Amino acid sequence: MNFIRKTMAGVFASAALAAATLVPSAQAQEDTIKVGVLHSLSGTMAISETTLKDVMLMLIDEQNKKGGLLGKKLEAVVVDPASDWPLFAEKARELITADKVAAVFGCWTSVSRKSVLPVFEELDSILFYPVQYEGEESQRNVFYTGAAPNQQAIPAVDYLMNEEGVERWVLAGTDYVYPRTTNKILEAYLKAKGVAPDDIMINYTPFGHSDWQTIVSDIKAFGSAGKKTAVVSTINGDANVPFYKELGNQGISASDIPVVAFSVGEEELAGLDTAPLVGHLAAWNYFQSVDTPENAAFIKEWKARMGENRVTNDPMEAHYIGFNMWVKAVEKAGTTDADAVIAALPGIQAPNLTGGMSTMLPNHHITKPVLIGEIQDDGQFEVVSETEDLVPGDAWSDYLPESKPLKSDWVELNCGNYNTETKTCLGGS
Amino acid sequence: MRLIILLSGLLALILAATMPVSADEAELRAVIAKFSEAKKFSQTEAVIEELQALGDTDAVPTLNALSDGLLQVRESDGAVFIIKGDGETVDLLDPLTREAAGTAPGADLRKVKVKNSIRRLIADVVSGLTLRARNSAVRLEAAETMFSRPDPAMIATLDGVIAEETDAGVKTAFMQARAAAVLQSDLPEADKLDAIALMRDRGGRDVLPILTAIGASTQSDAIRAASREAIASIEESMMFWDAGQNILYGVSLGSVLLLAAIGLAITFGVMGVINMAHGEMVMLGAYTTFVVQEFIRTSAPWAFDYSLAIALPLAFCVSGAAGLVMERGIIRFLYGRPLETLLATWGVSLILQQAVRTIFGPTNREVGNPSWMSGSFEVGELLITTNRLWIVVFSGVVFAILLLVLKRTRFGLQMRAVTQNRPMASSMGIATPWVDAFTFALGSGIAGIAGVALSQIDNVSPNLGQGYIIDSFMVVVFGGVGNLWGTLVGAMTLGIANKFLEPYAGAVLAKIFILVLIILFIQKRPRGLFALKGRSVEA
């Protein structure tokens, strides 16, 4: 069954792709710089990734209006990896070798990123990855513009601990690499903060889980032990909607058991009646409701292009920052050659949409503010807490014993996983 | 705009001039006005505490509005109002009297920000202020809030309130709130033992943490023994309720499985067509619900509570028509070639998914719950969510109707005749191709109806159907191909088994266990729970 599904998906996707890519490349001239966009436009992840393709096209158009880059026009090459992880690697190879793109912006899930890593390493190209992820990785060819765990998960837990007085924790996630690693880090962090193992409940559910009755009532029971309880949710994608519906229906309000989510943004709330969810939290580095002139201009342009009802979210901002950083690095290097741009990127600054300047660090992560927002009844978030300074992204978590001595520095050490105790570079990834 | 401000300013002046302002009210207004300067959460908290200190019940509407995010400040003059309605201009209400105080453009208003900890503070303050409210429901709510966050300082106040209380139910609630506070206080042992007895009578899950806490912290052996014994008795009765709750969850999951599978029980079970596009028929039904709700939202908002009733026949028609076209256009050429049917219908499912993605976009669409399908109620310690209850009822009704159609109508008779012995039915003058077509349309239409129900508990996205296709085949194969009763029993068995496994094994493992069980079961009984006897089985 599965092999049929895969082959068919491949056939359909490549047919759609041929139609999509043939037209622009027929008109392509030699004096354009090609930018690859590697986001799923069909399959389960299309719900999140299609938006990122649209924002990339918008950013490229905008840059072209400003006169392009190095005197040339930019040209987007859009491919559809169809939410199929091996296909991500194939499409990445196609973008780099056949289309000769200067850089690729793409991927959402960690498994898709892991599947393209060897391709980017082998063919020596550049990938900008815009989604919050579990960390524990730093690759020379990849620039991580989403949040590392210390830029999202840890500050969120700190907020709950200090502001809400939470003492008992439910770590609920979808069963795959991002939630498992994040929860491992969080569990170690909570225990380091003196939380008893009895006060931590960890729960995993399959992708697209829709029957939350038992789990929500378990959370309710766990929360009635006399200590303030909160849920830290790394539940991914579609499973969130029935989860929040069940919370609302079973009468769990945010002032009793708040849920802080790392994968729920404006886009996910758009499919949901948020009235019963007011007060539940999300931790991101950007919210649409942030009141800055840069953000207002970005939202205005996005709505003008895509329609009044569309919302903006955190991974879109990450692409905005990443794209501008790439443009500046190419200008600084004077070429789109991958090695020159990779060398130029660390230290490059680009404005983020929350009123600050993000910097690309030597470990290929960026500095970002951390915002905690409460869900409002209009499907937006209201910021209730914001870090004063930008937080630098940390590739290797300090709370896991195996990654504590590791350090990533591509400028001085030229190594993604330098062990500071043995003074050696482990190499590999 | 300036005119409006002028007018409303004038109105406020007139109001102020004509109304007798008591000293208390002036004081209250002065405190409420401070909300306009509270830019930080800590400042807002300070103002709320000032209101609490005044102890005037008139402040309750202001506080409730603040908690709901409806207390807003007019930027132009810093006056505080409760707002009503949304859109370009909103109505302003006086924060104390809730009388109309003009309108203002939404852009001129700034919300007084609140967060969870402030909402909790407000709930505590309001419960303290409403202990003597005229409405018994409000008093009951105040008692419940006090029970959930007991404060020993309130014991004296509660004693007074309990003495005055006339409503028996509210009085008990206050006594329980007092007992919870007593257990945290320094009162003598006898008082605490009385309180534990009261807690034990109340029962329920929310008493357990209070009893556990007192059992762990007390020095007195008598109190520890009493609390331990009370916990044991409550836990014993909870075990019984927990089992009941699990069965309820199982029935609810079973009814969802039944709804998803029942259309397939016709197309696959009765006709033998491996229809991989079954899930997409469900999805079409869900999207029909979305379109109906969109139409109602824009043109007849009052009819929103009826949207599902309107969507039901439409979803049946849309999915049924899609099924009819599919049968006439593709499947009828492939009868007797199951592998080709599988591939063709799977292709159709991809086409339908991408078509919906192109038309409606890849993101989730919001399908609202009508008011009669939101919320939950309690029977004893059982929590029943209304939407799940309706889905159980609904799947039962669909099942009964389908059974009636199959067993009691002429069409049902022809359908059964064709599936049992095609050549014989044909020679008796039944137009078998059309019976096939309409049977397939019926199965698809039922799937569409299921989509209306599933839109209430799941995402409405192009992937909706994929999540149910495997489960549906599982139910039909497990229950016995070609038997509706088998589908019912199969769905309920799988639902309840899943829910009993889930607390022990977790959601991921529970699903795997169920699949393993089915594999073992099919080894033993290859034709499922209720094997159908007849020629169609051999065909």
Image (cartoon, helix red, strand yellow):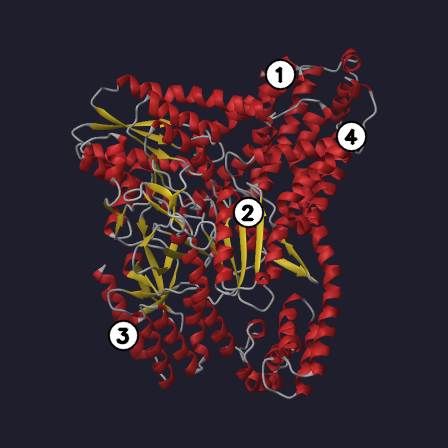
Which quadrant does the N terminus of chain B fall into? Answer: bottom left
The amino acid type of the residue labelled 3 equals Leu
Q: Which residue is mark 3?
A: B13
Picture quadrant of residue A92:
top left
The amino acid type of the residue labelled 4 equals Gln
Q: Which residue is mark 4?
A: B523
The amino acid type of the residue labelled 1 equals Glu
Percent of width and height locating residue A291: 28, 54
Nearer the observer, disc 3 or disc 2?
2
Marks 4 and 2 on same chain: no
Q: What's the chain of the residue with tag 2?
A: A
How many labels, in total? 4
What is the distance, in whole Å, between disc 4 and disc 3 at their CAs? 85 Å
Residue sitting at 55 percent across and 52 percent down?
B371
Nearer the observer, disc 4 or disc 3?
4
Element carrying mark 3: helix
Percent of width and height locating residue A252: 55, 59
Element carrying mark 2: helix
Q: Which residue is mark 1?
A: B340
What is the distance, in whole Å, between disc 4 and disc 1 at their CAs? 26 Å
Picture quadrant of residue B220:
bottom right
Q: Which residue is mark 2?
A: A242
